[in-house]
Amino acid sequence: MNTLENLAKTIAARKNADPATSWTAKLLSKGPEKCAEKFGEESIEAIIEAVKGDREKLTSEAADVLFHLLVMLESRDVALADVFAELERREGTSGIAEKSARKP
């Protein structure tokens, strides 16, 4: 099991924890929309650091993005394994070909 899988497992375990003692439970208790909003905020912060070229801050923000992506997925009951399966399905396919094959 890798770090992302471990983190996803921890997030799932905290889904029903006390929101007063768990940041993850607090986010999840606010619903999928709030989880998506927080993911968006963290993504923008990562973009800003990428544009600035601050490697250390980008690394930190990227970790926040991954965490909040996993929280957002958990809020909609999307398993990380399903995301991995989709990436595996796309493996070896040109990004241009994959995108053009998507339904409009």
Image (cartoon, rainbow, N blue to C red):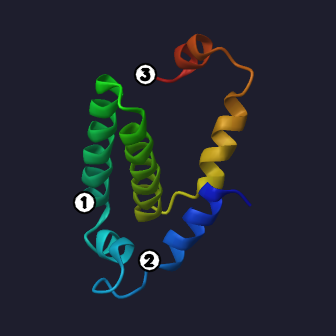
Residue depicted at x 60% and y 46%: 83
Q: Position of residue 40 (x, y in %)?
A: 28, 44
Q: Residues within 10 Å of mark 3 (few under 14, many from 20)?
A: few
- The type of residue carrying mark 3 is Pro
Name the secondary structure under disc 1.
Answer: helix
Q: Residues within 10 Å of mark 1 (few under 14, many from 20)?
A: some
Q: Nearer the viewer, residue 29 or 68?
A: 68
Circle 2/circle 3 CB separation < 8 Å: no
Q: In this figure, which residue is indicated by the disc labeled 2?
A: 15
Disc nearer the start of the sequence (2/3):
2
Placement of 89 over or under 64, stated as above or below: above
The mark closer to the camera, 2 or 3, is 2
Q: Position of residue 48 (x, y in %)?
A: 27, 31
Placement of 45 over or under 7, stated as above or below: above
Residue depicted at x 29% and y 25%: 52
Circle 3/circle 1 CB separation < 8 Å: no
Disc nearer the start of the sequence (2/1):
2
Placement of 9 over or under 70, stated as above or below: below
Q: Nearer the viewer, residue 54 or 82?
A: 54
Name the secondary structure under disc 3.
Answer: loop
Q: In this figure, which residue is indicated by the disc labeled 1?
A: 34
Q: In this figure, which residue is indicated by the disc labeled 3?
A: 104
Q: Which part of the image, by quadrant, shows the C terminus?
A: top left
- The type of residue carrying mark 2 is Lys
Q: Residues within 10 Å of mark 2 (few under 14, many from 20)?
A: some
Placement of 83 over or under 44, stated as above or below: below
- The type of residue carrying mark 1 is Lys
Q: CA distance from mark 2 to mark 3?
A: 34 Å
